[in-house]
Image (cartoon, rainbow, N blue to C red):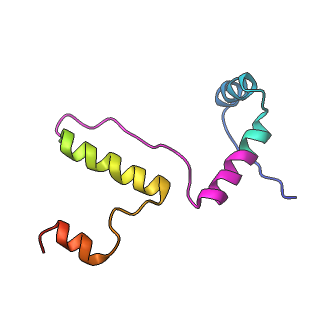
Amino acid sequence: MATVTVRVDDETKLKASDIAASFGFDLSSVTRAFYRQMVREGRIPLNLSYEPTPNEPTPNEPTLAVIREADEIAQTGRQRFKNADEMFGSLGI
């Protein structure tokens, strides 16, 4: 077994402990679960987002639909096309 030390301010630790406790966990259990999920998924399982600046364009609905489809493909490993010819055909190439 290895020991991991995490430095975090007191307020954040208290709030995180309260959230973990509301699910019946302690912070060590949550941290172990987070590490295991990273290993299982081969990625850092965080949803990072930000508020766009006023001058930054907002994606329209067709773009958002493609983003959602890409997210679903990434989550499930589903392939959209069976082969390269099918992909190029859909692009009219």
Residue 56 seen by the camera: no
| 85 shown above or below 67 | below
Q: Is residue 86 left or right of residue 16?
A: left
Main SS, magenta region, reads: loop
Q: Position of residue 57 (x, y in %)?
A: 17, 42
Residue nearer the viewer, 17 or 12: 17
Q: Give the quarter of the image for residue 49.
A: top left
- Taking the view exactly as shown, the residue that stands out farthest to the left is 92
Residue 48 magenta-highlighted? yes
| Range of magenta residues | 32-56
Counting from the top left corner in percent of width and height, residue 29 is at: 78, 40
Which quadrant of the figure has residue 39? bottom right
User: Which quarter of the rendered picture does the N terminus lie within?
Assistant: bottom right
Relative vertical location of residue 55 with respect to residue 2 in this rendering, above or below: above
Question: Residue 91 lies in magenta, yes or no?
Answer: no
Residue 22 appears left or right of 60: right
Q: Nearer the viewer, residue 48 or 65?
A: 65
Identify the residue at image location x=73%, y=40%. 30
Question: Residue at position x 47%, y 60% from top?
Answer: 77
Residue at (26% x, 43% y) in the render: 64
Residue 3 lies in what quarter of the image?
Answer: bottom right
Q: Which quadrant of the figure contains the C terminus?
A: bottom left
Residue 28 seen by the camera: yes
Q: Is the residue 48 above or below the residue 87 in the image?
A: above
Q: Is residue 32 left or right of residue 60?
A: right
Give the residue drawn at x 76%, y 49%.
5
